[in-house]
Image (cartoon, rainbow, N blue to C red):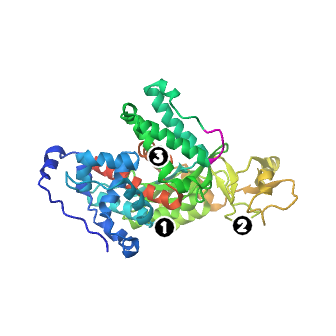
Amino acid sequence: MLPKKEFLLSSYSGLYDILIPKDHFLRKFNNLVDFEFIYDELKDMYNEAFGATAKCPIMMFKLLLLKVMYPMSDRDLIERATFDMSFKYFLDVAPEDKIVHPTSLTKFRKLRLKDASLLDVLIKKTVEIALKEGLIKSNQIIVDSTHTNSMFNSKSPIEILIEQSKQLRKSVYKQDETYKEKMPAKPSTNDLLDHINYCNQLIDIIKNDAKLYIKEDVKLKAHLLEEVVNDDIEHVNSTVEKDAKVGHKSSDSSFFGYKTHIATVPERIVTSAVVTTGDQHDGKQAKELIEKSVENGIEVKAFIGDGAYSEKDMIEYAKEKEFKLVSKLSKTVSEGNKRASGEFHYNKDAGRYVCNAGHMAIKKALHGKKKHATEGTVLRETHYFDIEKCKGCTLREGCYKEGAASKTYTVTLKKDKIHEEHQLYQETDEFKELAKNRYMIEAKNAELKNRHGFEKSHSHGLLGMQIQSATTIFVVNMKRIITLIG
């Protein structure tokens, strides 16, 4: 049975009125949101099969929100929540109450939050609050995607441990360089167990040195390393991040991880989001972002995005749904004439095509320029792929012909009537004025990364990334709502 929230009954509760100002952010946050909806979302995850009665799910969920607002390890979060009265007030516990053990938070994340719909539920809740407060008055959404590197960043477990331990040592040496002589010998093998043992030795030395362990920066990094070694050891032992994929930011820049596709209104409140692997095309998520925004109560009269959203089917969809599509046509506006649509996708940042396996063309060439100039014939653009990658590709069947000396994909650069109409719209003052709002979503993406740890995933797999996106966007939206109300 789902554990119900206990009423706060304590002779010390009056301390909150004295210590927590009326304008404190966490007080405003708590007063704006009725967190009872969390019970409905998690009730199916609480039953006899899970063993002993769990801690209040609202308190556990709020701990995850605090971790987004104040990035730190689970251990340091629980420690701070033990003595920080503003944290305890936000968690709805009595001033004298103990907080859960850090491992309980880990279990809550892994065992209870298994519903991918949590992202939609949390965004819907914040939009509902914003609409109720009369904060959203516009009828346009701005869309873009932001990438998040995998927790393992395509590195081996040994590379991860080396990097984490290096950061810890640097913090130690900033305090006192003489500690270089006290550090254990670095492992000389490529045995994972040797590196785990080394990290444990390093942690023990620091924890047993009271003079060093009292330093906040050293302690935080020691706890983060300990969390990687202990809590996530089953993932560290896996050299493959199954869900993360390679995505491309430009022709010579890539990342290994996930994408969060976001729609926001000019008031800078996120109205919908979709989490995918890093290789997914931005434009393919547009319709879902619109539909979810509409479902959340947003009237969409204009859709603002970059060239990734100007494909023919999107232009037709905009005409059907009667909203303005403010997205410039890409130079390549056709799907090509060699293969079925969907096997190759155009990456607007790199200006090249990417195959289903995630491999980007290494070069491209334009053909038919002379005839185009003299006779008005269409231009053809050929994209060349790395043949060595094609030979060993798991998806080569039906795509790469054995023994072929090259692998290419050719598209025609042409425009039909619907593209011509859209190009004319691009030149209007209305298009140009609406397009000026696109910078707002870039600022929102920067906020997610720079202030709330969205640069790197905090856990393993696509579901873990969806939970991270859900809690982070929920916090970012509530911060914006509180700012607008203030």
Q: Amino acid at mark 2?
A: Ala
Q: Quadrant of the N terminus?
A: bottom left
The boundaries of the magenta stretch are 187-191
Residue tagged 1:
321
Residue tagged 2:
340
Residue 196 shown left or right of residue 25 in the figure: right
Between disc 2 and disc 3, whose residue precedes?
3
Q: Residue at x 61, y 48 (%)?
A: 192
Residue 441 within the magenta-colored segment of the rendering: no
Q: Amino acid at mark 3?
A: Glu
Quarter assignment of residue 281: bottom right
Q: Residues within 10 Å of mark 1 (few under 14, many from 20)?
A: few
- Mark 1 and mark 3: span between their CA atoms? 52 Å
Q: Is residue 326 visible?
A: no
Out of 32 and 116, give the one closest to the viewer. Answer: 116
Residue 226: assigned label: 3
Which element is circle 2 on?
loop
Q: Amino acid at mark 1?
A: Lys
Residue 441 shown left or right of residue 483 in the figure: right
